[in-house]
Image (tube, rainbow, N blue to C red):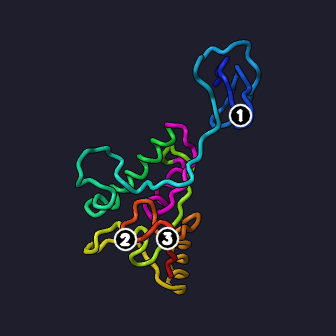
Amino acid sequence: MRLHGITVWDGVNDLGPTTLAWDGDQIDEVTPAPRDQYKGLAVIPGLVDTHVHLGGPAILTDDSDYTFGTWQLVTSREEQTMHVAAHAVRAMREGVTTLRDMAGDHRQIAVRNAFDAELIVGPRLFVFGMVTMTAGHGDMSTPPGATQRPPTADGPDECRALVRRYARDGVDGIKIAASGGVFSRGDATKGRNHT
C-alpha cells in the first residue's frame, strides 16, 4: 500500500508532506513528497493511554440505573468481556494503539489474549490487577450487600497471596491502591494513610 503527499509527524519532528509505503503493519518507506494532498490530516504514531478501566458498559445511555457499579452486578461476565473488547476497539479506532487497564481481571486478560493471537484486531493491551483493602478504593464502589465483589487484601500475607493469584492469571503488572480514588466513596484521595 502507498499513500502520497500526507503530512507525517514521527513523534519528534514534523516531516512535512510525505509518501508512505507499507506492507501489513510494517512501514517500508518514508520519503518526502512534493505537496500536501490531504490538508488538515496527518499520520502520527499510535497514542498510548496508561490508565483506563475497560470493565464498564460500552453502551452510552441516560439510564441512571445503568451505572458502572450496578451494571457489573446484573451483567454476565461473558457479556462484560464483550464490552471490554468494544471499549478497546473503539479506542484503537480513535488512534490509541496501546492501553493499560489499571483494574483488570479475567475479562481484560481474555481480550488481551484474543488481540495478541490476532483473533480480533485490537490495540496492544496491558492488564494490571488492583490490590486494595476491604472498604478501600474499588471495594467501596460495590454496594455492601453484593456477593460478587472485586478482590481485596488486608495485611501483608493477603496482599502477597492476591499478587500471586494475579500472576497465575497472567496480569502484566500490579496496581496498589493505597488511598482513595477520584470516584471513591468513604476513602480520601489524599491526606490519609491506609494500613
- Which mark is first along the chain, 3 or 1? 1
Q: Secondary structure at mark 1?
A: loop
Question: Can see residue 117?
Answer: no
Please identify the quarter of the rendering in which residue 147 is found: bottom left
Q: Is residue 29 left or right of residue 103?
A: right
Crowding near pointer 3: few (<14 within 10 Å), some, many (20+)?
some
- Which mark is first along the chain, 2 or 1? 1
Q: Secondary structure at mark 3?
A: loop
Towards the viewer: 99 or 62: 62
Specify start and end residues of the magenta stretch as a single range: 94-118
Q: Residue at x 42, y 73 (%)?
A: 136
Q: Amino acid at mark 1?
A: Asp
Q: Secondary structure at mark 2?
A: loop
- Alpha carbon separation for disc pair 1 and 3: 38 Å
| On screen, residue 112 above or below 31 | below
Q: Is residue 94 left or right of residue 38?
A: left
Query: Quick check: is 99 in the magenta stretch?
Result: yes
Question: Mark 3 sits on what residue?
Answer: 179
Question: Mark 2 sits on what residue?
Answer: 186
Question: Can see residue 17?
Answer: yes
Q: Position of residue 181 (x, y in %)?
A: 46, 63
The mark lying in front, picked from 1 and 2, is 2
| On screen, residue 12 above or below 174 | above
Crowding near pointer 1: few (<14 within 10 Å), some, many (20+)?
few
Question: Mark 1 sits on what residue?
Answer: 10
Q: Amino acid at mark 2?
A: Gly
